[in-house]
Amino acid sequence: MKFCLIASSEISIQESLKIILRDRFNTICVQSGEEALEALARSPIKIVFLDTNLPDYRGLSLLERIRSMNITVPVIVISSGNLPKIRSEKAVNLLDDILIKPFDKEQVDFLVERALERNQLVQKIHYLEKKIQETHGGFHGGNGFGKYDGIQPYPEKKGDVSFNYQQYAIREFFKSLTHISDIEKLLDYSIRQIAEIFGINKVSIMLKDDSHPRYVIKAAIGLDETICKSVIFDMTSGCPSWFLRFNQILKREDAVRNLYTSDGLLIYEQMERVQSVISAPLFSKGKLIGILNLGNKITGKPYFDEDFELISMISNYLSVAIENSSLYREISIQKRYNENILKNIISGVIAIDRLGRVTTYNKSAERILKVPFREVHGKPVQRLGSMFADILLRTLEGQAIYQRYETVNPVTKAPLGISTSQLKEETGEVLGAIMVFSDLTEAKELEKKIKTVERLNFWSNLANRLAQEIRNPLVAIRTFAQLLPDKYQDEDFRKNFYEIVISEIDRLNHITQKLMEFAQPRENQFEEQDINEIIQQAIIAHEKKIVEKKAKIIKSFANQPLIAMVDKANLQEAISNLIENSLEAIPEGGKVKIKTALANEKVEGIQRGVHRGPYVQITVQDTGCGIPKEHVQEVFSPFFTTKIKGMGFGLPIAQRIIQDHNGKIELVTQVGKGTSFRIYLPYAEKGVA
């Protein structure tokens, strides 16, 4: 377990930090600076929380004492908000971060992670320095990167060994930064290390704004916060424009020499605003993604040629690191977005790799299947059960692709709707398979309720219409029955009464017969038949009506025989009913067009059967007045008719016969232009049962 030191005289701060850090550290709490120094001397402390208001040390004096002991442990200063003093030029190289009171767990966790990561990088640098010292006797600059000032005392020797190895160590440090995904951490580590390397107290990094063509300060040391928030470089002028033209490090003296030009004056003013004497471009893939600004050295010495070599190297690695971090951020955002979709989608989603291991298993899948995530993720798909494993593995191997496939969960007995697909590379290589499924329990219950309501509505409407149809004959029969005692001696009355009663009884019998014909399933004897011949016979059966109506029948039959497995008599009755309906709808001299064809398109709504081949399409089209929109839904209901005569059983019976043949009938109508009925029947090639 790691140790954390909390130096504060306030018990509330100690207890709060102990609670927040208890899962990661053993905490040592002290209330004075001397106790803190003793704890640092005797215990392997990994991180320090230091209150600036201790009874024996004030401000940053204790921090200076800690650093004088050559202790490199990360120090996070606890402050009540006196930021200008804490972030003074002297403090930037002493502390690692600032925790502002009042604080919360997220703030503490973030600062701890950032401090520990930076400390690891510092340890890596120390390791590199040690290796170089063991081999070449150390750097001329002395104490690590923090005291580097060119290659003194040998500024003339560009090939100096110590400089080359120091350059190597710095390069290794900035190479390690390319693996940091958090842009804030990356920039923070970079500016702190750059300040130590060159011994400067003002460093800033400007990056291109995502939403505007400009550059703004994203990280800085030694600059006032108001400056950081207000400085904006337009990308079409000043320093950015100069970098895009020349792609080289910019010195303040370059701007001074060109003060007489408007561009030179703007460059000088911009460098003055960020208090830099050196600015370096950060290029990635030919684009200027940022600007690195460096202030004067604390020693007052100038920048040497070797400094510029290091700045150039650092800016190159920093550009790569920033670009990598941005790409990682974009990928992370997309990943979180996708994960959020998977988390909130109501359908279950399961994906497997090419080895059959579960790689994706969302919350809905866990809820529907009642199998915990930990039991299946990363495990063979067989953990989900043989049915799901079989479906996914068959999909993976290309044996089957399921679309709206309905099955039952063998464990929960819940109905499921399943669709699957292979996961492929752009090259077509199969990477895995995915299944999307839904629990259909509620949908099935709703479907049952809807069907129940529809059935009740149907029988209610049927009963009402049947009552109306029966009531008319009963009125006549009742009237004559009531008058019979008084009129019995009247021979004409008896004769008239007899004829009317017999006619109305026949009418009642006809209604009953049609109702039974509609309601009872028909006996079908399916045989291969040519649909064109059946239609021709149905037309002949209506010749008398056609002549009476002076109608014109226009036939447009397919050239080849259209073979289907049908009951000839029943199908002929259905087509006859459609022709009868069209002849009733057209005016005298009107037209009825009957067309047959082979339809290859997919037909939706076939209620049963597994026919996937082409369909025989029959179209019966009239030039009548059409059907009003409000009546379209009632066309196939018994007793619905707009004719003076007839009971409205023709179309419902036709629909029932077509459905019995595993077919479908559609209605297309337009008021004032006519009506078309389209029939689809499964096609069978000649000789195929």
Image: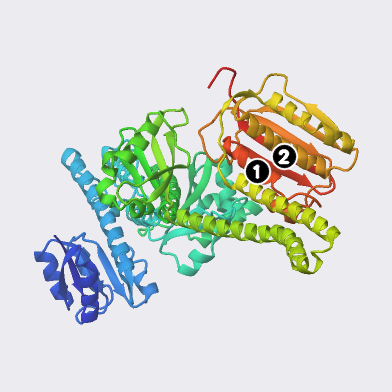
Rendered image quadrant of residue 83: bottom left
| Sooner in the amino-acid sequence: mark 1 or mark 2 | 2
CA–CA distance in space, label 1 to label 2:
8 Å
Q: Secondary structure at mark 1?
A: helix
Dot 1 amino acid type: Ile
Q: Which residue is mark 1?
A: 653
Q: Position of residue 84 (x, y in %)?
A: 39, 73
Q: From the viewer's perspective, tell me whether residue 54 is left or right of residue 226.
A: left
Q: Are marks 1 and 2 in contact (CB under 8 Å)?
A: yes
Q: Position of residue 307 (x, y in %)?
A: 38, 46
**Neighbourhood count class around disc 2 (C-alpha, 10 Å): few under 14, some 14–19, many 20 upward:** many
Dot 2 amino acid type: Asn
Q: Which residue is mark 2?
A: 577
- Which residue occupies the extreme front position in the image? 489
Rendered view: 167 above or below 7: above
Q: As rendered, which of 260 and 501 lies closer to the eye? A: 501
**Neighbourhood count class around disc 1 (C-alpha, 10 Å): few under 14, some 14–19, many 20 upward:** many
Rendered view: 603 above or below 513: above
Rendered view: 544 above or below 480: above
User: Residue 168 — which label?
Assistant: none
Q: From the viewer's perspective, tell me whether residue 330 is left or right of residue 174.
A: right
